Image (cartoon, grey):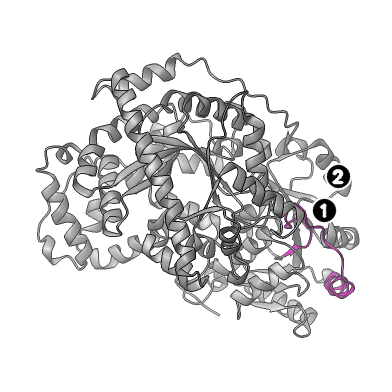
Amino acid sequence: MEERRRITEERFHDSQLTGKYRERLFDDNTFINFAALMLNEHSAYNIPRVRASLAVLKDGQAVFTDLEKVYLYRYVFTKGVPAEDKIELKNIDQLPDADIVSAIVQMESDRSHPVYSKNTLYQDTLLWVARSYRRSGVHYAEISDTALVKESEAAETLAQIHAVMPAVTAETGVTLRFLAAIRRIPLIMGHSGDAPQNAYAENLRVLRAVAGDPYVAGSDFVGEEMNDIRELQPVMNAVLRIAKEHPSFVVRIHAGENDALPDNVLNSLLSVEKALLPGQTFPHVRIGHGLYTANLKSEKGRALLELLRRRQAVLEFQITSNVRLNNLSRLNRHPLRQYLNAGIYCVQGTDGGALYGTDSIDEQLSLERMLELSDEELLRMRQAEKEIIDRSMREFEQKKTVFRARCAEGAEAAFYRERILQDTGTVLLFDTGRLASTDALKEQIAPLPQDRVPVVIAGGSFNNAVRRTRLREADCRLLDDLLKRARSGKFFVVIGPSLGGYERYILEKAGTELPVFAFVPAQISEAERMRLEKSGVKVRVALECSPQGVYKSVAYEIFKRRPSVIIALDGNAAASNLIQDAKNSRYLSRTFIGASSRALRAKAASLQGYVTLLDDWDTAESIAAYVDYYYDLLQKPVSESLKKPGSRKTEG
């Protein structure tokens, strides 16, 4: 692998990418024979570890960064290419894993199939996905795929789907259709100077070209919910213009997955309404998650329920995903029963069952047992599901007839390449007025001290969009005690970008002896620039453009590199993710949680043994003790001593 990576580096030596992105380019284009890794003399060691790496953490809660890591590992199957150095299969029945043996036997049989024998890796993936659905009794599924909005991939992807899916459906009875997935935050924004509208313009140009394909059911706004859906109104306007040309078009939006933006579900529906053209009917709208909203008994909550009913929008619930991705710690606050009683269309999904090691049966049992749904309530969900699937299958057949009149069988790739090239594009007007933080704050950017313990304070920046932090006298006294110890030179403080609440309190009192670093998003407004500049705080620029995503860079630069202490006095989803990321890290970390925050108390209850509630005992002395302990570890020459027990070689 190292030899192949050296070749890759030579191949891309002219790339303008730097740092982490340059390394990622090399990694993504270095290939080894994965079958040889799985089926060699070390199979008993390799197979369980590979299997574990392909699913989200099963023995605890994860965060979205863990999910993104799993996506990278799954590139073997989703972005792989045929191996140049084929291996000979022999003594397969002696492999130490019955599932692998069974799969290889089936794959060998597929080689003689008139269609499957020519399968690409992607087509094999579709075949095996359909077979897994068949085992669960599923006969219709929609899968979100970003390839369908990429100019370089869409035409070939659809050609592969058309070539294999008739045979797959004939064998399994499963119909797979796809939602062309648009990232709510384009990846390009994090590491290049390109504007978001350029990425979206390509997405929409390709979507317009492929929207009439029978296997394309509609579009999906995907990705971690870190921004207000109203920021994407220009994109929504363009999607609705496409939907008007295709009456069966589904508009799916991931919203209400975490508590950072509790109005996103309502605003998603309002954004669709705002984008409607004269005479256009409201499209098939589905909301993925809908877990967090305004209180459904409040005026705003009742307005949401009325809008959901009137527009016949559908809410999709994926309880395993919500729990495993650190978005749901208290089941008694789950809103599903309220929606059902209000007459809202609700269905269950898996949110990518293989990522969590579940299927639709597991999800139904979870809803029934964990939320104590009655047979009648489950039946209402089943009836909503049946109505959606019956309509989708009718529309699928209608679109097939229309499509075949326009495109001959086997000519799909050329058909779509031409359509994409002929499209003149979409003009998107984004008036963000935001600045690149690396330029706007270049005088304040500084490296983190390597010889001190980081103390991360969540007390203002990691709240949701509507929560404002109120200072409590007891917590201020705690911070005062911490500040008195600044002369020791053993720690530095990390805060978020808002400089509000407890963060402002400690920043104003820190003085010159205590370094304070604010992690800020990759893009900021002029007002934010002025506030940060006036404060004089040292700055670290995160990879994410949204303040709600700053926690990822805190985890990357701190929790994944050294021991740390967290003092979480207030916060919602982002603070909860900070806490979970620290717990999941290989390095020692201790979290102290403020008892006044209901959301953080719920998080503390799920992590007993890893956190301390600030009302429990003499926490000022306890925080100081952990700082001293971690500081002593930092002074040791053997870095392995910093890691948790069980993390490879461990000392101390």
Q: Is residue 232 visible?
A: no
Q: Quadrant of residue 236?
A: top right
Q: Which residues are magenta?
A: 456-484
Per the image, the residue denoted by label 2 is 531
User: What's the residue at 86%, 48% (across, down)?
Assistant: 536
Compared with 610, 353 (above or below) is above
Q: Secondary structure at mark 2?
A: helix
How dense is the environment of label 1, judged by Cα within 10 Å: few (below 14), some, or many (20 and up)? Answer: many
Q: Earlier in the sequence, mark 2 or mark 1?
A: 1
User: What's the residue at 50%, 77% (across, down)?
Assistant: 645
Across and down, in percent, residue 563 comes to 62, 68
Across and down, in percent, residue 162 comes to 28, 32
Answer whether labels 2 and 1 touch (C-beta < 8 Å): yes
Across and down, in percent, residue 594 comes to 76, 72
Q: How many numbered discs?
A: 2
Q: Quadrant of residue 146?
A: top left
* Tag of residue 499: 1
